[in-house]
């Protein structure tokens, strides 16, 4: 049987060879952990049925909870989000089948617009390496039959899933923009299916150490992200200068604010550093939807005076890529925007 896992271990060991020894590498990793990890936390839990309530006070309370969580945590979880458990289950099943394909097929057959990635090509040391593989898929390619090869059953499910996630993202973005005195369509006007992405993630079990990053510390380069994850756990976020462990909730989707919403909101909403830690025994699956604008979209502030200067998404992405190439990671808004 052909191997489905990417060659993560050889590449990680090659990076270790550039350090003094493995202990030094793990000690460096512990520095990135930012101190002791707190106990599992429950993210703010918001029932989105409140937005559909006939009672205006209930609708206001739900909107207020979304905006407060976006300001205080930068993360929250939602239930009654409108995406059926049946669709989520079908999507997870198709995702597992896709990642079970031989590594060579995933890497060379041009699946899903040649969107397969693994590890961290830019890493120069162990703490810049992500123990994971992923398909980073532009929504514009989801309908193209030629992208799927022998995975034809994935197409219909992925299309339905993307549409459902896009609808939820528009709903949440509308709440967040209205809260700051703007039309709810402000973000929707510059973010559509031509500019957004889905990322299908798999984090293989890591036999080395539970201190290996499944995904290195970072903030998201979008307006907001919606995450559907399994129950394995591993997601951590920075809260009050400490890493906290996010307890999985099988009924909820996780939402987090991206850099663009922080800039647009003049720092009212927070784009928070987060990471995934590898599991020594179990693989982990997740799918993220990224609400992104077009590259020529101008990102300004919702009010003046502005903390950040105006910038295009393309300008921002270019700077992020330079930072990643130089530092091996990307955390927070680039300083050139201040």
Image: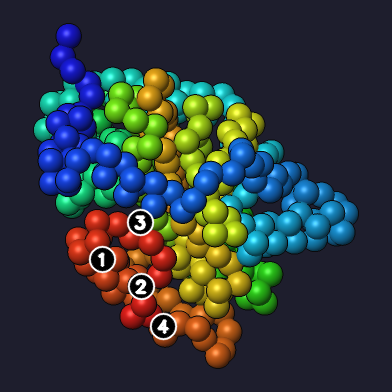
Whichever of labels 4 and 3 marks the residue nearer the N terminus, that label is 3
- Inter-mark Cα distance, 2 to 3: 25 Å
The answer to the question of whether label 1 and label 2 lie on touching residues, with beta carbons closer than 8 A, is: yes
Image quadrant where residue 61 sits: bottom right
Q: For mark 4, what is the residue?
A: 338
- Where disc 1 sits, the SS reads helix
Left or right position of 85 against 98? right
The answer to the question of whether label 2 and label 3 lie on touching residues, with beta carbons closer than 8 A, is: no
Q: For mark 2, what is the residue?
A: 334
- Inter-mark Cα distance, 1 to 2: 8 Å
- Inter-mark Cα distance, 4 to 2: 8 Å
Colouring: rainbow
Q: For mark 3, what is the residue?
A: 194
User: In the picture shown, does residue 266 fall above or below 109?
Assistant: below
Residue in the picture at 49% in, 27% down: 232
- Residue 41 in the image: state x and y as whole percent: 64, 42
- Where disc 4 sits, the SS reads loop
* Residue 328 visible, this orientation: yes
Whichever of labels 3 and 1 marks the residue nearer the N terminus, that label is 3
Nearer to us of marks 4 and 3 is 4
């Amino acid at each position: 049987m052909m191997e489905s896992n990417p060659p993560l271990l050889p590449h990680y060991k090659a990076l270790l060879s550039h350090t003094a020894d493995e202990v030094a590498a793990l000690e460096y990793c512990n520095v990135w952990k930012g101190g002791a990890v707190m106990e599992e936390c429950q993210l703010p839990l918001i029932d989105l049925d409140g937005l559909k309530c006939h009672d205006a006070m209930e609708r206001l309370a739900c909107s207020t909870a979304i905006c407060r969580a976006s300001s205080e945590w930068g993360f929250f979880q939602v239930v009654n989000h409108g995406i059926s458990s049946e669709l989520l289950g079908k999507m997870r099943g198709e995702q597992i089948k896709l990642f079970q394909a031989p590594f060579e097929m995933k890497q060379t057959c041009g699946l899903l617009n040649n969107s397969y990635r693994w590890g961290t090509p830019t890493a120069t040391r162990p703490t810049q390496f992500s123990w994971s593989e992923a398909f980073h898929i532009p929504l514009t390619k989801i309908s193209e039959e030629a992208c799927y090869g022998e995975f034809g059953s994935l197409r219909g499910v992925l299309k339905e899933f993307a549409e459902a996630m896009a609808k939820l993202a528009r709903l949440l973005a509308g709440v967040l923009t209205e809260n700051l005195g703007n039309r709810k369509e402000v973000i929707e006007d510059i973010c559509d299916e031509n500019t957004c992405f889905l990322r299908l993630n798999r984090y293989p079990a890591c036999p080395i150490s539970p201190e290996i990053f499944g995904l290195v510390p970072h903030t998201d380069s979008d307006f907001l992200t919606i995450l559907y994850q399994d129950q394995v756990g591993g997601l951590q976020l920075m809260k009050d200068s400490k890493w906290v462990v996010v307890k999985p909730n099988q009924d909820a989707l996780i939402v987090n604010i991206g850099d663009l919403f922080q800039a647009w909101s003049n720092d009212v909403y927070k784009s928070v550093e987060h990471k995934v830690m590898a599991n020594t025994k179990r693989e982990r699956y997740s799918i993220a939807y990224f609400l992104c604008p077009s590259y020529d979209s101008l990102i300004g502030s919702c009010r003046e005076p502005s903390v950040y200067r105006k910038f295009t998404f393309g300008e921002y992405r270019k700077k992020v890529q330079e930072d990643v190439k130089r530092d091996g990671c990307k955390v927070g808004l680039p300083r050139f925007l201040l």
